[in-house]
Image (cartoon, rainbow, N blue to C red):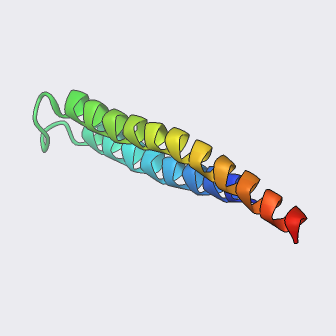
Amino acid sequence: MSKKTRLILAMVIIEAVLAGIWWYLASYGMANPDRVTADFQSVVGQTMGMAMGGLLGLGFILFFVAASNDRKAAQNKTRR
């Protein structure tokens, strides 16, 4: 399995976990409006959106690094 494939798989799993946490917190806030602050939904949305977006941006950069490493490994493999 190439490094690009492993990175994509890891990013999908991590993003799915973060989406699950986001879903849980949003449903908790809707189910318990008396236990959360008035701006709970917007704070959760902004925080989780920022976390998921930042991780996706980092994954985008890491994808190009992994692609470069895959190309270098393929070149070294053909030389031997």
Residue 11 vertical position relative to residue 30 in the rendered view, above or below: below
Task: In this rendered view, identify the residue nearer to me: 20 or 1.
Answer: 1
Instruction: Assign the N terminus to one quadrant of the image.
Output: bottom right
Would residue 1 be visible to someone looking at this image?
Answer: no
Task: In this rendered view, identify the residue nearer to me: 1 or 34.
Answer: 1
Instruction: Assign the C terminus to one quadrant of the image.
Output: bottom right
Q: Is residue 37 left or right of residue 63?
A: left
The residue shown at (81%, 59%) is: 74
Measured from the top left, where is residue 8 in percent x and y? 64, 50
Measured from the top left, where is residue 11 in percent x and y? 56, 50
Measured from the top left, where is residue 48 in percent x and y? 33, 39
Q: Is residue 25 left or right of residue 66?
A: left
Task: In this rendered view, identify the residue nearer to me: 43 or 61.
Answer: 61
The residue shown at (72%, 56%) is: 72
Q: How many marks?
A: 0
Q: Quadrant of residue 57?
A: top left
Q: Is residue 72 left or right of residue 75?
A: left
Residue 3 vertical position relative to residue 31 in the rendered view, above or below: below
The residue shown at (68%, 48%) is: 67
The residue shown at (42%, 42%) is: 23
Measured from the top left, where is residue 21 in percent x and y? 39, 50
Residue extending furthest toward the bottom: 80
